[in-house]
């Protein structure tokens, strides 16, 4: 179950002197010739990753079942942030087959064109509701073609930590959700030498500008910090469905949106999602706000 991690770690350690002396790029080591072969096994096909992805999938299925029970004609939209190599997607899509008549869209997003092409080749044929789309969760939605108040479920696996400001990241993710829509976060739960010596060699590992919230020496957040920040950003009914497994280095957090969008222009505005938010005005500048 550690084979993929050991291979990746071995490759990175052998290249470490050249990476530190800038004789080569860490991206070229971890993704040789733009290949994902070294990292795919870290996110799937090992006991820990598969167990957390399975619990995530079961949580989504339970939510969908409840929504369909309440409204058999419900058409649900899912958005996955930083879907990457599809480690979470690959196990989740088969679980959605029984509900495919109620799935309107699965927006598979990433900031890498290579990952979006990967999704186009691997998933769209068998799951026509899968739509690869560029999305940087650190930036406003509309300039990226993402509609606010449009999704029922947001999925984020091992991606939110790689952003400068967790609060702004959560605000943007929350802006995509309907009221009572849920976000499911699958994230590292403690410091890891493996992560530090592999993905920690990439620039994205060190983007955080809110160190007070992060685990010391890591971009991750402890479970209690996630819970506090989510509450402060207007998420409710926060649960940890894999709490007994946090010692394995991962955590799952599920939180429900309270239906308010907080957007910063010249001040913070809290806007109830009851009308067309794209027509809202900034009361200071009288300009369209990004959402």
Image (spheres, grey):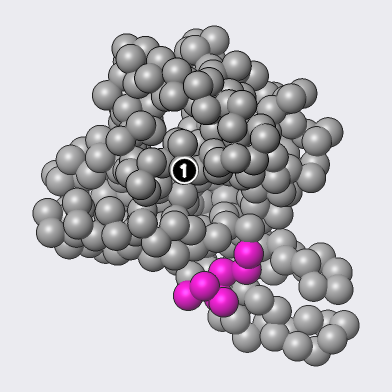
Give the class, few, some or many, for how many residues have Cα within 10 Å of label 1's Cα (few <14, many ≥20): few
> Does 185 appear above or below 127?
above
- Specify whether residue 230 is in view: no
Q: Which residues are magenta?
A: 139-145
> Does 184 appear above or below 248?
below
Locate residue 271, reporting x and y percent.
69, 68
How many numbered markers are drawn? Answer: 1
Locate residue 279, reporting x and y percent.
63, 86
Q: Nearer the viewer, residue 156 or 13?
A: 13
Q: Is residue 107 magenta?
A: no
Residue at point 65%, 52% (across, down): 169
Residue at point 60%, 16% (across, down): 193
Locate residue 231, reporting x and y percent.
70, 40
> Does 91 appear above or below 101?
above
Looking at the rendering, in which quadrant would you find the N terminus? Answer: top left
> Does 145 appear above or below 254?
below
Question: Left or right: where does residue 39 sit relative to residue 268?
Answer: left
């Amino acid at each position: 179950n550690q084979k993929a991690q050991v291979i990746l770690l071995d490759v990175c350690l052998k290249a470490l002197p050249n990476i530190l002396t800038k004789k080569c790029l860490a991206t070229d080591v971890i993704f040789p010739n733009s290949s994902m072969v070294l990292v795919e096994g870290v996110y799937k096909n090992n006991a820990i990753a598969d167990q957390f992805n399975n619990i995530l999938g079961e949580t989504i299925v339970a939510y969908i079942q409840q929504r369909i029970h309440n409204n058999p004609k419900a058409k649900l939209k899912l958005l996955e942030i930083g879907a990457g190599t599809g480690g979470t997607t690959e196990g989740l899509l088969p679980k959605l087959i029984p509900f495919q008549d109620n799935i309107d869209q699965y927006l598979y997003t990433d900031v890498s064109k290579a990952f979006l092409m990967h999704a186009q080749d691997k998933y769209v044929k068998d799951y026509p509701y899968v739509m690869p789309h560029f999305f940087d969760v650190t930036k406003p939605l509309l300039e990226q073609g993402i509609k606010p108040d449009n999704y029922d479920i947001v999925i984020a696996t091992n991606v939110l930590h790689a952003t400068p400001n967790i609060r702004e990241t959560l605000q943007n993710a929350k802006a995509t959700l309907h009221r009572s829509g849920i976000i499911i976060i699958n994230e590292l739960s403690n410091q890891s030498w493996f992560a530090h010596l592999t993905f920690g060699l990439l620039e994205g590992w060190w983007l955080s500008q809110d160190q007070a919230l992060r685990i010391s020496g890591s971009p991750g957040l402890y479970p209690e910090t996630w819970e506090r920040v989510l509450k402060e950003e207007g998420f409710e009914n926060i649960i940890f469905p894999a709490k007994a497994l946090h010692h394995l280095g991962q955590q799952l957090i599920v939180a429900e949106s309270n239906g308010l969008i907080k957007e910063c222009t010249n001040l913070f505005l809290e806007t109830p999602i009851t009308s067309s938010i794209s027509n809202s005005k900034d009361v200071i500048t009288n300009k369209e706000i990004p959402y």
